[in-house]
Amino acid sequence: QVPLEESGGGLVQAGGSLRLSCTTTGSILGFNAMAWYRQAPGKQRELVALDVSGARPNYADFVKGRFTISRDAAKNTMDLQMNSLKVEDTAVYYCAARYFATSTWPYWGRGTQVTVSA
């Protein structure tokens, strides 16, 4: 099992910013791909941003231009910079990772709550 741990969630007003981080015990650069997902109450988990080694990041349409995914080798984290937050961004945000180019995500964090108030 590969431990992933998210941090950085919290309560912020609409229009504000938060930065989420995901860390692991091994090298963050060792993963073929990492992603951020989110799940709002009563809704299915959805992909927010995807970072595949050697490729440009991909973003869900609802966060394009507002969120940025990146990996920081020095801190050994994968981060999600979230700007211009909206009330509808309220959700539990999960970090996911995989070592191989597959369609599944074998490793998940426990999630961090992001709450955006009006």
Image (cartoon, rainbow, N blue to C red):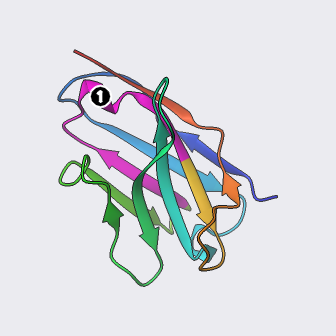
Q: Position of residue 26 (x, y in %)?
A: 71, 66
Label 1 residue SS: helix
Kind of residue at disc 1: Glu
Residue ID at (48%, 79%): 53
Q: Is residue 86 highlighted in magenta?
A: yes
Q: Residue furthest bottom?
A: 54
Residue ID at (47%, 31%): 43
User: Looking at the image, which is closer to me, 1 or 44?
Assistant: 44
In the image, taking residue 21 as reference, residue 6 lies left or right, namely: right
Please tell me whether residue 113 is drawn above or below residue 102 in the rendered image: above
In the image, taking residue 108 as reference, residue 51 lies left or right, namely: left
Q: Position of residue 103 (x, y in %)?
A: 59, 70
Please tell me whether residue 110 is drawn above or below residue 23 in the rendered image: above
Q: Position of residue 44 (x, y in %)?
A: 50, 38
Asked whether residue 42 appears in the rendered view, the answer is yes
Residue density around tag 1, few if under 14, some if 14–19, many if 20 or more, within 10 Å: few
Q: Quadrant of residue 25?
A: bottom right
Residue topped by disc 1: 88
Q: Quadrant of residue 117?
A: top left
- Magenta residues? 77-94
Residue ID at (27%, 24%): 87
- Looking at the rendered image, the quarter that the C terminus falls into is top left
